[in-house]
């Protein structure tokens, strides 16, 4: 097992790519369709978010940029800190009392964000 340590940066790359693509994929529809953004705004409004349209744009844009940053390994720690805030808010404001499977994507992204905050991009990223 100790021989696997030399491949730890490859593991970080796999996480960055998988979850970076997930963030981009999950937000691109809101960026290309204002109607989709308004649906997200209405969702946030229904959950009592202040300034729901601004909140929707902020969350979507930050997630999209974090996804791109994770994919290329740029500003990974800063973007991860922002995603920790984003998904912590999502879990507490939207998912408390929700079924685990509905909450799981936010939990997983929070966990990956925490990992990347502490570990950075690894050697296969622009941060290196």
Image: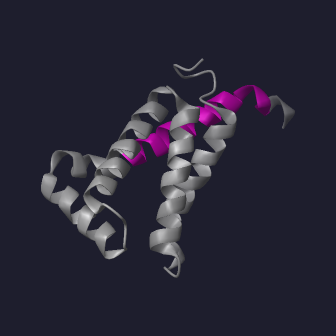
Q: Position of residue 125 (x, y in %)?
A: 54, 22
Figure label count: 0
- Identify the residue at image location x=65%, y=44%: 115
The answer to if 15 sits in the magenta stretch is yes
Q: Is the image coloured rainbow, by chain, by secondary structure, or in one colour?
A: one colour
- As rendered, which of 26 and 42 lies closer to the eye? 42
Name the image quarter holding residue 8.
Answer: top right
The answer to if 54 sits in the magenta stretch is no
- As rendered, which of 6 and 24 lies closer to the eye? 24
Tell me the quadrant of the picture where the N terminus can be found.
Answer: top right
Tell me the quadrant of the picture where the C terminus can be found.
Answer: top right
- Identify the residue at image location x=62%, y=35%: 12
Q: Position of residue 94 (x, y in %)?
A: 44, 72
Q: Position of residue 106 (x, y in %)?
A: 50, 61
Q: Up-down: is 44 above or below 23?
A: below
Q: Residue furthest right?
A: 2
- Identify the residue at image location x=48%, y=45%: 19
- As rendered, which of 104 and 61 lies closer to the eye? 61
- As rendered, which of 70 and 65 lies closer to the eye? 65
- Identify the residue at image location x=15%, y=51%: 33
Q: State left or right for residue 48 relative to residue 125.
A: left
Name the image quarter holding residue 66.
Answer: top left
Q: Position of residue 37 (x, y in %)?
A: 21, 56
What residue span does the magenta drawing correspond to?
4-23
Q: Up-down: is 107 above or below 118?
A: below
Magenta segment, principal secondary structure? helix
């Amino acid at each position: 097992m100790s021989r696997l340590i030399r491949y730890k940066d490859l593991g970080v790359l796999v996480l960055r790519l998988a979850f970076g693509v997930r963030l981009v994929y999950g937000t691109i529809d809101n960026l290309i369709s204002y109607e989709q953004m308004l649906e997200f705004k209405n969702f946030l409004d229904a959950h009592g978010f202040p300034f729901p349209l601004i909140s929707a744009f902020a969350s979507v844009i930050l997630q999209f940029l974090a996804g791109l940053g994770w994919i290329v390994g740029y500003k990974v720690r800063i973007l991860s800190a922002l995603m920790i805030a984003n998904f912590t808010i999502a879990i507490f404001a939207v998912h408390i009392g929700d079924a685990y499977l509905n909450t799981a994507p936010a939990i997983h992204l929070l966990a990956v964000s925490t990992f990347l905050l502490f570990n950075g991009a690894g050697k296969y990223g622009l941060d290196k």
